[in-house]
Amino acid sequence: KKFEEDETPKSFQSVALVVGVTGIVGNSLAEILPLSDTPGGPWKVYGVARRPRPHWHAEHRIEYIQCDVSDPKDTESKLSQLTDVTHVFYVSWVNRTTETDNCEINGSMLSNVLHTLILNAPNLRHICLQTGAKHYVGSFEYITSGKIEPYDPPFTEDLPRLNTPNFYYVQEDILLQEIEKKQGLTWSVHRPNTIFGFSPYSLMNIVGTLCVYAAICKYEGKPLLFPGNKVTWECYSEVSDADLIAEHHIWAAVDPYAKNEAFNVNNGDIFKWKHLWKVLAEQFGIEKYGLEEGKNVGLKEMMKGKESVWEKIVNEKGLEKTRLEEVGFWWFVDILLSMESPMESPMLCMNKSKEHGFLGFRNSKSSLITWIDKMKAFKIVP
């Protein structure tokens, strides 16, 4: 439950800095950390993001800091003042055209944050770094190139790194280097699969993107065609719920048995997209849906020229003022839903998390409905 105003504690046991607080997991952390029953609490929460605070984020009880962590001077100026931080939750990333560029920018962002906090926050105890399943399958650039020989799933945390550039590897190396600078400072790395969650600002929001696609299909009276291929339609898949990932971060931050380890995190169940597609269609009142081979050309192609349609939907339905390119990440969903082989579906083993004490799970169908409802509640889609 959330604190009432008069219940707010006068002192905090833990002080969190969430970097990337308007992202898909950052948003969940901003909601969960201030709750009265969150482990390690009561928590004071600072949230950092590059843009001004959006009003869909305003209800979270955090101190919002607008800061561009890719800029060392801005990072030093704003984060050096946060001397009371005890835990860092790093859930931020930016996307560049090549993985070499991704390594450079994402590495420097993390380095700027950790360098500043380790120097200025004497009570800093733990750093959570979020990476993901691309640790095992390679970056988008290499996944689509066909140059990587994938591991045989399920993926365990001890698999060797792939011999390709990957900004996750760069971030882990930076984390381990920075940790050495402060005695007693611990760390954890969190590797989710495809994330179901809520953030209009997320670069990889599959639920949001599919909701926008479904809303356009509904408005135009068209069937909800699966934009991917038959392999992805039929094979087993798994996802990670954003709230579950946030709980996983908090568990590792406060549980002594979870220190200095990398952990996979997923919902703990499997599904087929052909079953979840029915759920998506039902949530938007679309009667005709499915896979029609030959018509599955991908969302990037299907949504070309739909900007004016989206503008009409936004105006007629009284939605948040968004442009189509701000809420539809077609390229990302096209990659996820167009696997060439069932072996490409990243299946993460959860045994290590369970053995260290994390027993959280989610029903992926229920998770999808929850996040669709949230997209509607915040008037991102009708």
Image (tube, grey):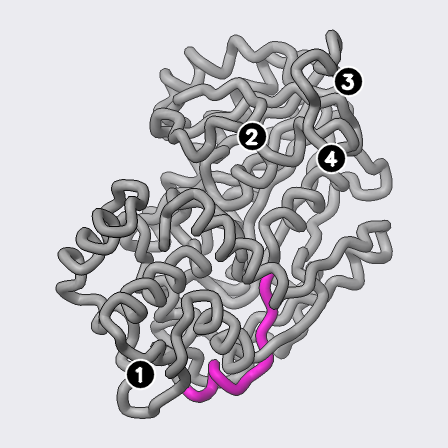
* Residue closest to the far bottom: 293
Q: Are marks 4 and 3 in contact (CB under 8 Å)?
A: no
Query: Sequence-wise, which precedes: disc 3 or disc 1?
Result: 3
Q: Which residue is mark 3?
A: 13
Q: Vertical placement of 128 versus 182: above or below? A: below
Q: Total of numbered circles in the picture?
A: 4
Q: Which residue is mark 4?
A: 253
Q: Which residue is mark 2?
A: 18
- CA gap, disc 2 to disc 1? 39 Å
Secondary structure of the residue carrying tag 4 is helix
Tell me what residue is drawn at x 41 percent, y 84 percent. 290
Secondary structure of the residue carrying tag 1 is loop
- CA gap, disc 2 to disc 4? 12 Å
Query: Sequence-wise, which precedes: disc 3 or disc 2?
Result: 3
Work out whether residue 171 or residue 257 is closer to the camera in this orientation and state it: 257
Tell me what residue is drawn at x 39 percent, y 61 percent. 211
Q: Quadrant of residue 339?
A: bottom left
